[in-house]
Structure formats: C-alpha cells, structure tokens
Amino acid sequence: MSACATPHTQQPHPPHDPAPTRRRFPVAGADLSAAVAVFLIALPLSLGIALATGAPLQAGLVAAAVGGIVVGRLGGCPLQVSGPAAGLTVVTADLIHRYGWRATCGITVLAGLAQLGLGCLRVARGALAVSPAVVHGMLAGIGITIAVAQLHIVLGGNPDSSVLANLRALPAQLAGLHPAAVSMSALTLALLLAWPRLPGRAGRLLRRVPAPLVAVTGAAATAALTGLSLPRVELPSWHSHALAGLPEGPVLGLVAAVLTTTLVCSVQSLLGAVAVDKLVAARTGPQSRIGRSDLDRELLGQGAANIVSGALGGLPIAGVAVRSTANVKSGAVSRNSTMVHGVLVVVAALLMVPVLEGIPLASLAALVMAVGIQMVSLHHIRTVTRHREVPVYAATTLGVVVLGVLQGVFLGVAVAVAVALHRLARTRITHHEKEGVHHVRVRGQLTFLAVPRLSRTLHLVPQGAHAVVELDGSFMDHAAYESLQDWRSSHTARGGTAELSGRRDGIRTAEQAPATECRCRPWTPWRNHQACFAAAAAPAGQGAGRELARGISSFQRNTAPLVREELARLAREGQQPSQLFLTCADSRLVTSMITASGPGDLFVVRNVGNLVPPPGEEHGDDSVAAAIEYAVDVLGVRSITVCGHSGCGAMQALLASGAGRQDGTPLQRWLRHGRPSLARTAGDHPGWPRLAGREPADAVELLCLTNVMQQLAHLRAHPPVARALAEGALELHGMYFHVGEAQAYLLAGTGEEAVFEDVTGGIGGGEGAHEAVRVTSGGQV
C-alpha cells in the first residue's frame, strides 16, 4: 500500500528558495568539458566529410560551427550535436558534380526553407513512420558509397562520382598504389581501432582523448617527422571563400535535389533526436532537467541552420550520431555544450589554419572510410532479419548504391508496402478431421480478402458435427467476423456445435461493443491463460524470471498504449478511488478482472484470509488499520468491500488448527484474527449465511462466508469507519467469489437473513436486500 497525495489533502508548499546567486561563468563545468570533447571529434570529421563530398574544406568547418551554434540554440533536442554528417556525403557530392559548389549552397538554403515549412506544419512525428528497415538500408547504402569512394583516396588516387565506376576502377588503383598515402591511411586506421581498446588504468585515462583526434594527429605528426610527400589539407583564405549562388538547371532536377537533401537531413536529425533521448534516459548519475525532444522544434532548428550554413558557403547540416553520443557520454547537461563546441570550431577555423594544413588528405579519407563502414551496422542487419524485413533493407541499400539516395528510399518504401500487403493478404486456412472433431485452423490476418476461402473451408464441416475453429493471428476485421459468426449460428441451428479458440495474444476485431455493455478494455487476455505460464514450474531462476519479463514486455507492447493516457491523467490529478476493496492475497483472486475495474478505481488491500484485526487489540497489526484510516479520512471512499473466496487456504488452516492457540510462527499469529470467525461457526447457529438459496457446500465454504461477515463486524469497530457510518458517508459490503464457478456473490441482509446473492441474478430482489454493488472503470458504485 502506498499513500499518495490526493485532492483531499492540501499539499505542503515548498520552502521559499533564496534568490539564486549569479554565477560568474554561465556555462556549467560538465557542459564545458563535453564541448571540448565534441570539438576534438568534430574538427577532423568535418574536414574529412568536406573532402569526401568534393567541397572546399572550409565548408565543413562552416557547417560544424553553424550546426553547433544555431541548432544548439534553436533545436528541440538540446544534447544533439549537428553539423556535416556522413549520411549527407553522397547527396552533397552528387549535387556538386551536377550543379557546382555555389549552386549546391543555394540548394541547401532551399532545403532549409522546406524544413522550416515542415516544422511549421508539425509533421515531424510523421517522418518516424518510415520503416526502420528503409532508414537502416539508406544509411547502409550511403556508408558503402562513402567507403568505396574514400578507398581510392586511401590508395593514393581520386574517386569517381559513381559507385559502379569506382568499383570498376579499383583493380587498376590497387595496381598503382601510392606508398605514402597507404602508409598514413594504415596508421590512421590502426590508431582509430586500437585507441579505444587500450588496457589498464593508463588506457582508461588515455581513452578520454577521442580516437579520431588521436588518429589524425598521429598521422599528421608522422608525416611531418618523416618528410613524406603527399597531399595535405589546403584552406584558402577566407577572403576567397565562396558563398551561396542561385542554382540553375532543369526545374524538376532542382526540385528533386531539394527534396532529397530535405529528406536525408530531416530523417537523420529526427532519428538522431530519438536516439539521444534514449541515451539521456539510460545515463546514470545526476540527471539534467531535460525532457523528451520536441521534434517539430528540432526540425525548425535544423531548417534555420541549413539556411545559414548554405548562405555562408557551408555543407548541409543534420544531427550527427558520433558527436551526439560523445556529448551525452561526456556528461553534458544543457544545450550550452553544443553551442560552445560551435564557438570552438570558429576559433579553430580562424586561428589554427597552419596546424590544420599539416593533416594528410589520406588520413582524413581513412577516417571517413571507417565512418562509412560503421554505417553498415551488424546490429541493424540482425534486427531486420529478426523482423523478416531483409527484402526491404536489401532493396533500399542496393537502390541507394546503384540509383541514388532518393530513388533508393522510394524503392525501399515500395518494397515495404508490398511486403506489408503480402503479409496482410497471406492467410492459411486448413481443415482436417480428428476423432470425429473437425478442426479449421486460420493462420495469419483474417481480413475480407480471406473471407471467400474461409467460407469454402467452413462449409466442408458436415451438419451436426462438432467443429473447432482455431484463430492463430492478431487481427480480424468486421467482414471476417460477420462471416464467422453467421456460419456459427447456422451450424449450431442445424444441430452442430462450434468452438472458437485463439492464441493467447487474443483476437482484435473491428466490432464495436454494444452501447448497453461495459466498454472497458480487458487489461489481460484471459483465454487459455494458463498456457502462457507453462514454464512456471521450472526451477527457481530458470523459468519464472523469464516469464515475468515476458509478461512485462507484453504489458508494454499491448496494454501500456491503451492505459497510458489514463495513467498520465491519474499521475497529474492523484488517486481518487471511490472504494476500499479488502480481499485475500490468493493468486487466483484478480480484483481488476472480477470487478472490471481499471487504474485509479479501487484502493486495494490484500492479506492472507482478508482479515481485519480489531482495533485496540494487544500486539495487533497496524497495516490494515492504517489503510482503513487513509482510505476513509484521506481518500474519502464511499464504500468498503470485504471479499472472501472459495477454497481459501487461510480458512483451511484455521479449521485444521481449531480453537487452540498456536502462535509460534508469523502466519499462526496473523491467523488469530480469524478465530472469531471460527468460533462463530461452532454449534448449531441460526445465523449461518446461505449462498444464493443453498446451504454452504462444506465446512470450508461456511467458514469463508462467515469470515466475511465477521470481518465486517471488526471493520465497524474502527473509529474512522464508525464515524463515517454515523454520518451516512460510508457503506459496507460483503462479497464472496467462487473461483471454480467464476461467480461473484454479494451479501444481502445480516443476522438470520444473511444471504450471499448471485450478482447476475439481480441483488435486491428480496426483502431486506441492499442494492447491488457494481464497480465499473469509472469507479462508480
């Protein structure tokens, strides 16, 4: 039992906070250290991506600075770091090849305007509806394109704009290796792979320095010390830096270019924001006060950054996974870290030109090639394989590699739609007879497309036969439902019997519940429920833990989406139940099921034997009394129900022990509160309760019924209950649940007229009977 604050109690006001002291430095230390770490990663990667696209190397620095400052200030994901992304390399390289650099900057500006429009339309969440297999395939295709192109630079050559052309030229490139370029590339890759794996305490300290920085710095220092002759970074004077120009060319081609840039920038940024949310939620230690990302605002921030970057002659901008991950893991607590990182890039671009010009181009190419290879994620491949979406992934990847990014994405979406339609239309319906019983099994989604085959199969069942229809799927539409019900009615009318069964996940139908029935959704599918705990008998630690985790996973998938809105409301408003429901701890007694109640409806107290210790008893138990006081005085419940059940183990233990005192164990000491019930059943007592017009089946059932009445008497003795009863603000009810019959009974009358009536039979029909208690999801009584 947990006592939560409710509207019945006034919430204490928090103590008045003193005026916050003004810090001398407005950036937290964690943000500053994270900004430095991200800057050290962003600097070489920005140059490498600019090299891979064929753009001026300064364009990478411009994009990194603008992405850090503009998106950091305006974006909806404070800890996501934006800048030139490897996912945009192929798109940008193709644009530069077709339209030139200045026109590409103009296309970037137009793509930013398109992102602003999408953000204003608040469609950011809709972008996440794209199949993950399409997104992963797009990134894999881009990664392959990057790796193949940069391999030529690693070997000392120049890449072509086409992947197929680069593959055809690869044998000739291998025959004419450039030893200096290959050696610097090999050194870069070796440092990049080995640095994160340094062992020992010294390794842990050294690993704080980003591996990309170490790899590029090591290659640059080696090239300088050995005097190798190979191409290096060239940063022209900022006075000659090219700005955006108006793109010229076919209108349809330019529209396609803008759409492609917008698509890749937006999808990568939004998916990155979602990934950053997960990283922040999983981060241990003191958490920053950062909520979930505002994706529409993130889209607006990305659009503004692309407008600024394109206008200033920078590369297109998107959220970058490597830098964002480093930012979160470095302990950043606000958007200040991304903004400071952008400022540091500006400082480096202005003051560190001689240092940057010592970096070999082969080293940057090796760095970007490694990033491209990492974009072909084995984890993503395993995921799409597990979900049977390999065709979608493969089609998207090949489409991006052979046709281009936009064409590859469209191809992937088309294959995803085709696969979905195939799964929806693929329904296997079989019929066989076994021992006189006709079994019809339906595997897959049962929609109107399968109704003709379903009807033909069902009519194979002879008249008067017993049929079992097994529905092994997760959805059944209205047409299929009507067809199945019509056949069942017709078959039973001709003397046959029909049984419908489904797998434990249940069958969802498009049928609406009648207006006169309770519209509450069941929290758990109960059909064949025992089958889902088949492993419960396994040894401890082998089966039960897995079943518990499986049940929790099923709740998160199936039930949580249905109740999340209601639980969010209850979290805001506090609990306001109308009933205190005091029942037994028996595992077969599920209060939410037998009362059709939901979250917030009942204040439930469960103990062994549904006992209510009398107040003031020496060595009494205060937990139940505390729950009663809280429910009546704080929550203001209008009724209290004491619910017993058939086959109660506590009552059996009382009968076995008799009236003798056996208080040696905690269980025996607790059961002493049930001895008055046992004494009440002794002898020929005229006030024995009856159950729906019949006498109790045996001594255990008699004691279970009597115990409900006795605990109600104990309940009346508690001061809060007695006071509320006197004021007419509270009702007490007795209830008995027969487990084997799945039947609930309510106590009608007291004393010699004590009868537990069938709820479905209409309590209140006899003299002296009270009105039936019906608990609904709205908590009404």
Image (cartoon, rainbow, N blue to C red):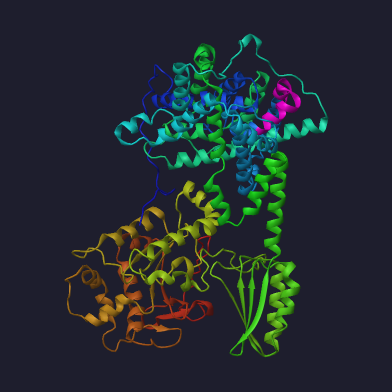
Residue range (magenta): 90-107
Picture layout, residue 652 above or below residue 712: below
- The single residue placed furthest to the front in the displayed view is 175
**Residue 104 drawn at (x, y percent):** 71, 25
**Residue 72 drawn at (x, y percent):** 54, 27
Q: How many marks?
A: 0
For the residue pair 741 and 288, the one nearer the viewer reads as 288
For the residue pair 175 and 256, the one nearer the viewer reads as 175
**Residue 6 drawn at (x, y percent):** 42, 49
Q: What residue is rendered at 54% in x and 25% in y? A: 181
Res 297 visible? no
Q: Is residue 271 magenta?
A: no
Picture layout, residue 20 above or below residue 171: above
For the residue pair 674 and 139, the one nearer the viewer reads as 139
Horizontal side of 353 relative to 430 (left or right) equals: left
Q: Predominant secondary structure in magenta?
A: helix
Q: What residue is rendered at 70% in x and 80% in y? A: 458
Picture layout, residue 476 above or below residue 109: below
Q: Quadrant of the N terminus?
A: bottom left
- The single residue placed furthest to the top in the displayed view is 239
Which image quarter: residue 469? bottom right
**Residue 585 drawn at (x, y percent):** 35, 68
Q: Is residue 100 magenta?
A: yes
Res 525 visible? yes
